[in-house]
Image (tube, rainbow, N blue to C red):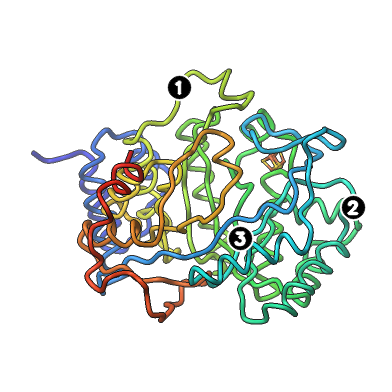
Amino acid sequence: MPSKIQPLLDKAVAGIRLTVAECTELLESPDVARIGVAADEIRERRHPDNVVTYIIDRNINYTNVCNVVCTFCAFYRRPGAPDTYVRTLDQICEKIDETIALGGTGVLMQGGLHPDFGIEWYEELLRALHAKYPTFQLHCFSPPEIHNIHLISGLDYETIMARLKDAGLYSLPGGGGEILDDEVRQRVSTKCTTDEWLDVMRAVHRVGLRSTATMMFGIGDDVSHRVKHLQRVRDLQDETGGFTAFIPWTFQRENTALGRRIKDEPTGVDYLKMLAVSRLFLDNIENFQSSWLTQGLKLGQVALRFGANDMGSIMIEENVVSAAGAHNRADEKMLRYLIREAGFTPQQRDILYARVNRTIEVPAKDAVPEPANLAVLLS
Ligand code: SF4
């Protein structure tokens, strides 16, 4: 049966850029299967070798002290609260050693917005880690943390990024994007504005570093806010070309003030549609990541047919979204199994999506995980 949205999908598949109105129409359409087919076609064209990548790394959270309030966050603790922490250098090195032992190539390190940490604190940390692990990729901090350094140290974003790069920073995660529209942001958070987030990313790219871009939806946003988010990411990518990947996921509500207030939450169909439309609209971004951590391993696997070409991280450690109820977990064997069962060749990558050649200690054919593990991991 002909579909109303088919001409838009044909247009995107033909490589013609979608407008904001067309993006809105797609997100409002219930025809998710058709949208997925188009996104899969574009994924295949951009990544014709049938490879789906994944990374071995962990999220290290150097502190949970945070001096702003985000009502969607279950991780932060106010300065002075009894259960605050700041990880020592030894603790961080121990986590890096464990990551390297599992074949990891880098870490994603982020923390709350600590009121006392100026640029010197971050430089010292990076220099110490870079000296000890010169080839290990330090994918650290996020625009809100960089904005916090700007407030504490009084330096502009570009100077901060140049200094952090010099100290050993390899790339910047796209955290804290949530929804890039102040109407939504200001309702749920007191952290940096949309323009400040984008300005930090502009500075990151100007000093020659790459970053990812993320989106967390389901925080009181509607389709118009989601489209504005995509538009802002696409515009900046046109300007700088610095984003390596786009990673959408849904708000995790457990233990959060916002979760107690918001009635609706995005469904699996909402997630798949958002991912697929992102692939169609963001024609200038190469990689799209499945968020199995928030969607579960099964839906995370299905996402590979809705535009994603990357299965993300095995996530040896994660503390932020798991505090808000995302308890999914996987190991390398499981991710490789899911990728292969979806019809692709699994391939380890590094932070910048370069392929990592390493002897993998799982059977060459990626045997099915032990039944007991399968039950636990897929539950
Ligand atoms: S999301 Fe980040 S900035 Fe917001 S409260 Fe949590 S730790 Fe702080």
The CA span between labels 1 and 3 is 31 Å
Q: Secondary structure at mark 1?
A: loop
Q: Is residue 143 left or right of residue 296?
A: right
Q: Identity of the amino acid at label 1?
A: Asp
For mark 1, what is the residue?
264
Tell me the quarter of the picture where residue 283 sits: bottom left
Residue at coordinates 28% horizontally, 56% vertically from top-left? 369
Q: Is residue 46 visible?
A: no
Q: Residues within 10 Å of mark 2 (few under 14, many from 20)?
A: some
Residue 121 at x, y percent in the picture: 86, 62
> Which residue was labeled with disc 3?
108
Mark 1–mark 3 CB contact (< 8 Å) = no
Of callouts 2 and 1, the N-terminal one: 2
Which element is circle 2 on? helix
Say the numbered circle drawn on residue 152: 2
Q: Earlier in the sequence, mark 1 or mark 3?
A: 3
Quadrant in which the N terminus appears: top left
Name which residue type carries label 2. Answer: Ile
Q: Which structural element holds mark 3?
A: strand
Q: Nearer the viewer, residue 243 or 89?
A: 89
Per the model, the C-alpha gap separating discs 3 and 2 is 23 Å
**43 shown above or below 187:** below
